[in-house]
Image (tube, helix red, strand yellow):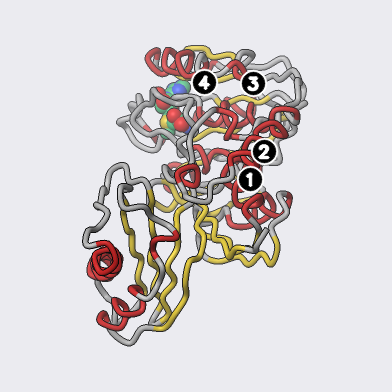
Amino acid sequence: MSKLKLIAKTFAGLEDILAKELKALGAENIKIMRRAVQFDGDSEVMYKANFQCRTALAILVEISKFYAKSTDDLYRKAKEINWSEYLLMDQTFSIHATTYSDVFSHSKYASLKVKDAIADFFRDIYGQRPNVNTDRPDVKFEVHISNNSVTLLLNSSGEALFKRGYRDRTGLAPMNECLAAGIIQLAQYDPEEPLVDFACGAGTILFEACLIAKNVAPGLLNRKYGFQRWLNYNEKLFNQIVEEAKSAVRNVSINIKGYDIDRKMILFCRHNKANADYFEDIRFYQTDLRDVETEKKSGLIIANLPFDERLQVENINQLYEDIGSSMKHHFPGFRAFLFSSNMDALKRIGLKPKVKIPLYSGGMQASLRRYDLYAGTKKHSK
Ligand SMILES: C[S@@+](CC[C@H](N)C(=O)[O-])C[C@H]1O[C@@H](n2cnc3c(N)ncnc32)[C@H](O)[C@@H]1O
C-alpha cells in the first residue's frame, strides 16, 4: 500500500497525547505541530487513525503541495490537479481554507479560487461540474496556506471525529468528547481505580473514560467516515479493522460514578448511557457535589467545573471554595483533576495544585489542575 502524508487535527495542549495514540497505530515520521500532528502511513493507518484515535478531531490526507505567488497562481496550480481521482460528477463537495499569509489574507477568497479551479477542471473535460454542499458534502477538501506555501488536503473523516454517536442530549456547556478523552489520558486514569465526576453534566468525561477502560475504539459506536464515500474505498480492509477492534474490547468491571445537581442532566446522562451497551455499569446520581462522599481509600476525580452562574450556581467563588473543602474532607487519598476556564474562581479552591496544564475550552483559555488529596491537605492562601 502506498504511503500517504497525513495530518491529524486536535486541540491545543493535546498534541503529545495524540502523537502517542498515532504511534501505537503504526504512524511513522510523526511531527508535532500546533493543534495538529503530521505523520506518514498507508490507508490502513489512515482508517485506523479515524476509527481508533480518541483525541483527533479530523484526519487529513495531503493531495498536493506547491508554492503560489498570487490568487491567480493558486487557481492555475490547483486546476492542474486531476480532481477526478477524488470526486465524481454526481458527488457534492466543500472546501475549507485556513490561511496564515499576507498574500492570501482572506481564507474565504482562497477557498473560492480552489472551488473555481475544481469546477473549471470538470467543466473543461465533461462540460458540467459537481455541486458544492457546505452542510453535508460527500467529499470535503481543505486548503492550508502558510505564506506562499499551499497544501491541498482531503478530509478523510467527514463529520468531525468528536461526533462519536452516543451523546444526543447535552446541557449548556458540554465538553468536547476529544478534549474529555485527552484529559482522561493526561490524568493517567487507571481502569482499576474508582472514577468520580461530581459535576458531570451530560456525562462526557465518564462515557469517554468507560470507552478507554474497556478499550472500545470510538469507531465501534457505529459512525460513518468520509473515506467510505471515496472512489478507492477498501471495504474489506475497513471491515478487518472493525473486527480487530471488536476483539480488542476488554470486558472489565469499572467503578465510574457521575453526580450533578441538575436533575435534567442526570436524565440526559441516563438517556445517553442507553445509546451503547458498553456504558451499562456507569452510575449517575442527582446530588450537590458538596454532599458527594466515598468509602474508597484512593481513586480519581475528574470534573469540568461550572465556570459561570448560568450553570446552576448562585455564587461561583463560594462554590469553588466549597469544592476545595469537600474534596479535602470527603476524598482523602484521591487525585483530583479539575478543569475550568474561570481562572479567578480556580484560585478559590484553596488547595495547592501539583500540576497546572493550560488547555482551551470553546476557544477560551482554560486550565486543568491536579490536586493530591490527603487527610492533612493544607489550605493554600489565595
Ligand atoms: C461545565 S458543566 C459540565 C459539562 C460536562 N462535562 C459535559 O460534558 O456535559 C458543569 C455542570 O456542573 C453542574 N453543577 C453546578 N453546580 C453544581 C453543584 N453544586 N453540584 C453538582 N453539580 C453542579 C451543572 O449543572 C453543570 O451540568
Q: CB of mark 2 within 8 Å of CB of mark 4?
A: no
Residue drawn at 47 percent across, 71 percent down: 64
- Labels 1, 4: front one: 1
Q: Of the residues under marks 3 and 4, which one precedes in the sequence?
A: 3
Secondary structure state at the residue bearing disc 4: helix
Contact (Cβ within 8 Å) of mark 3 with mark 1: no
Residue 207 coordinates in the image, percent (x, y): 56, 26
Mark whose residue sits in front, 3 or 4: 3
Residue 299: where, in percent of width, then height? Answer: 72, 28
Three-letter code for the amino acid on which mark 1 is drawn: Lys
Horizontal arrangement in the rendering, residue 317 relative to residue 71 (left or right): right
Q: Can you say whether 306 is above or below 153 in the image?
A: above
- Cα distance between the residues tagged 1 and 4: 42 Å
Depicted 32 relative to depicted 76: above or below: above
**Mark 4 within 8 Å of ligand 1, using the beta carbon:** yes
Determine the residue positioned at 45% across, 51% down: 360
Mark toward the viewer: 2 or 3: 2
Nearest the eye: 116 or 124: 124
Q: Residue at x 57, y 34 (%)?
A: 219
Ligand 1 picture quarter: top left
**Circle on res. 256:** 3
Q: Do labels 1 and 2 touch, CB within 8 Å?
A: yes
Q: Which residue is mark 2?
A: 241
Which disc number belongs to residue 290?
4
Task: Rate crowding at label 3 as few (under 14), some (14 to 19) or many (20 or more) other CA atoms within 10 Å.
Answer: many
The residues tagged by marks 1 and 2 sit, at their Cα atoms, a distance apart of: 7 Å
Mark 1 against mark 2, which lies toward the viewer? 2
Q: Amino acid at mark 4?
A: Arg
Foreground: disc 3 or disc 1: 1
Residue at which label 1 appears: 48
